Image (cartoon, grey):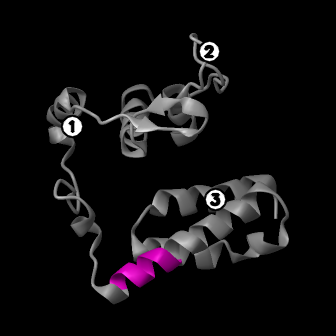
Amino acid sequence: MDAASMESACNKLHAAGDDLEALQEAVEAASYLDSVPGDFRQKLRAARSRLRKLQEQRERGVAAADRSPHAKAEYNTAEFDELVKKFEQLSWRMVSRPGGAVAKPDDFYRLYGLKQQVLHGDCNEERPMWAERGGLDFEGELIHAVA
């Protein structure tokens, strides 16, 4: 068990996303991470939790596409520019955060991070911690979390 193989197993867990079968295969393949303390084991446990939730949704008859009226089973890469324009034109409701901070919903930051990943590739900069005006930099933090 070298660091590269453990990192590869974690990448497969992340890449499986919400695909039940792919996630199940990735969790089974990465089961050896249970014996490794630290971040790799935590990522495996998070993936197992996500797998349980997906299995519960399947048992209740909730399909992944039922979560949002805008979700599709797969996307064509030719649609990317159109989807980016739609994303940038959306009006997002602000959500109160602990400590009095106000931010956009988590979905915004997840989609924004994925868009930045596609447009700019992997992030090789240091993870930001504070915004220029003294609050937490939720956007910057998510950009780096996705990469």
The mark found on residue 134 in the picture is: 2
Amino acid identity at mark 1: Phe
Closest to the observer, 8 or 99:
99
In the picture, the quarter occupied by the N terminus is bottom right
Q: Residue at x 61, y 25 (%)?
A: 124
- Element class at badge 1: helix
Q: Is residue 27 above or below residue 46?
A: below
CA separation in Å, label 3 and label 2: 33 Å
Closest to the observer, 2 or 66:
66
Instruction: Look at mark 3 in the image and give the residue it sits on.
Output: 10
- Element class at badge 3: helix
CA separation in Å, label 2 and label 1: 34 Å
- Element class at badge 2: loop
Instruction: Look at mark 1 in the image and give the residue it sits on.
Output: 80
Q: Which residue is drawn at 75% across and 65% down?
A: 41
Identify the magenta region: 52-58
Q: Earlier in the sequence, mark 3 or mark 2?
A: 3
The image quarter in which residue 133 lies: top right
Q: In this view, does 7 lie above or below 73?
A: above
